[in-house]
Image: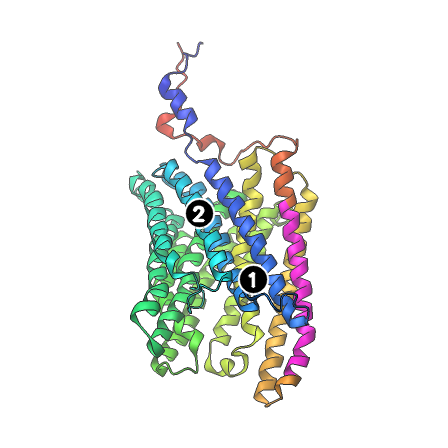
Amino acid sequence: MTTPPATARDTQAAARPLVNHGLVKWHLIAGMGWLTLAMFDGLVYSSQFIHHWRFPLAEWLSPGRIRMAHTNLVAFGFLVNSFTAMLYWCVPRLTGQRVLSNALGWLIFYVWLAVIAAMAVGLHLGHAQAVEWGETPVWLDPVVVVGAALLGAQFFTPIARSREKVMYVSLWYFSAGLVWVGLTYIMGNFFPQYLVAGTGAGPMLGLYIHDLVGLYVTPMGWGMMYFFVPVLLRKPIWSHALSLVGFWGLAFFYPLQGVHHFLWSPIPMFAQYGAVVSTIAVEIVVTTVIINFFMTWRGREEALRDSLAIRWFWVGALNYFVTCLQCAFQVTLTFQKIIHFTDWVVGHAHLVMFGVFSFWIYGMVEHLWPKLTGRQWWSPRLCRWQFWLIVVGLEVMFLDLTAAGLAHGFMMRGLSPWEEILQTMHPFWLLRAITGLVIFAGHVCLLVNLWMTARAARAAHVDTDYAPYEVLEEEQPTAAAV
């Protein structure tokens, strides 16, 4: 038995793996970096509510500008980078094809890094648009749209080249999200700015606020869950049919519900009623994802104890159930009379954006970082500390803000003086600041662990999940016996 020497084609195949680990790794690093800055902005913003504001004379550090930086860094700095890393990991494996160009991937990475930095500076200098979640300076909007188009080209290429006759459901969600994100951004940033004004811009703005979450974050998050959970549990998803019901329900109902951000406004009531009905309908659709997750997990209950990555996904799915049940009630006109413009809404937003999708991203990082660095986690104890600090901190923050919103709403209904409302809110806001510090401490545990895992000498990590599929099947070196 002899093995012939490796040919040039074999060497090229070994040097060009299916997945570019560098792009995955650096997009995750960028995402965690921007999330760190966004969390710090959130802590600084919360200090004004407990009478500890330290920048009374600095216009560029005014609370409004810090709040805009906080939300935009989460959306475009953290989520976009993290989901892009996820796409680089998942799409080639689901299609058996490489992305369009590694060089294009690095160009997108560095340009997007510059775009986020310019956006943060522009917001602090007061160059924001008067569009909620679309405050990105107008001179950056064309670059963002071009970036969305390039991302589409990067990932639609392997999808189009795939030899599989049936696409796995994750690719359905990824494909839709890549199409929707550019269209949603154009609708929210160009239409209200240049084409539609006054009350007519309200529905457009509501669509943008919610569709940015529902037509980008949601399909990327659902697709991520449908990819990683079966891998982590080592069993197929419970129901492919149910996953497609969720896809089409999302596509049909989600674009109709943006107006629910403007209930009791001058927008025509038929549009408000339509938004209420479609929101309740989409919450029913979301249960397909939750059912699929827990039914897939059934029979592998020990994974909740043995796998911290599954634990992140499990708590995220549970938070998803809570936030969707909550949303189905809070969107009604009756509930809005109490909770409108209160901290209830803030708690709801944090539970879904951080407690669901960010938790799932944490689970992905827990799973992937040893594979990207080739080393076992430097400190499993820090991993556990990160989990408990962040989970407990967020859940307490959610309960605190929910209670604060109810107290605020009922006091307004009772025509209580504003000074009395502010005094009542102070303990709630103090607890929010404390829980924010707890969450930030958990995130610092992750940052330390990421750095030390990448740099410190630790036991090598043996990838048993993906290593056999790192090279394209047709390019794997042959070992013919002579």
Q: Count neighbours of disc 2 (C-alpha within 10 A) and say few if under 14, some if 14 to 19, many if 20 or more.
A: many
In-front residue for pair 153/13: 153
Instruction: Give the amino acid type for the residue marked by disc 1 in the picture.
Output: Asn
In-front residue for pair 425/49: 49
Which residue reaches farthest front?
A: 57
Magenta region: 421-447
x and y percentages locating residue 211 in the rendered image: 40, 64
Q: Count neighbours of disc 1 (C-alpha within 10 A) and say few if under 14, some if 14 to 19, many if 20 or more.
A: many
Prevailing SS of the magenta stretch = helix
Q: CB of mark 2 within 8 Å of CB of mark 1?
A: no
Q: Which mark is residue 319?
A: 1
> In the picture, residue 269 is in which quadrant?
bottom left
x and y percentages locating residue 260 in the rendered image: 42, 75
Instruction: Give the amino acid type for the residue marked by disc 2 in the picture.
Output: Thr
- Asked which secondary structure carries label 1, the reply is helix
Quarter containing the C terminus: top left
Question: In the drawing, does residue 391 fall left or right of residue 280?
Answer: right
Please say if 352 is above or below 77.
Answer: below
According to the image, label 2 marks what residue? 84
Question: Is label 2 or label 1 in front?
Answer: 2
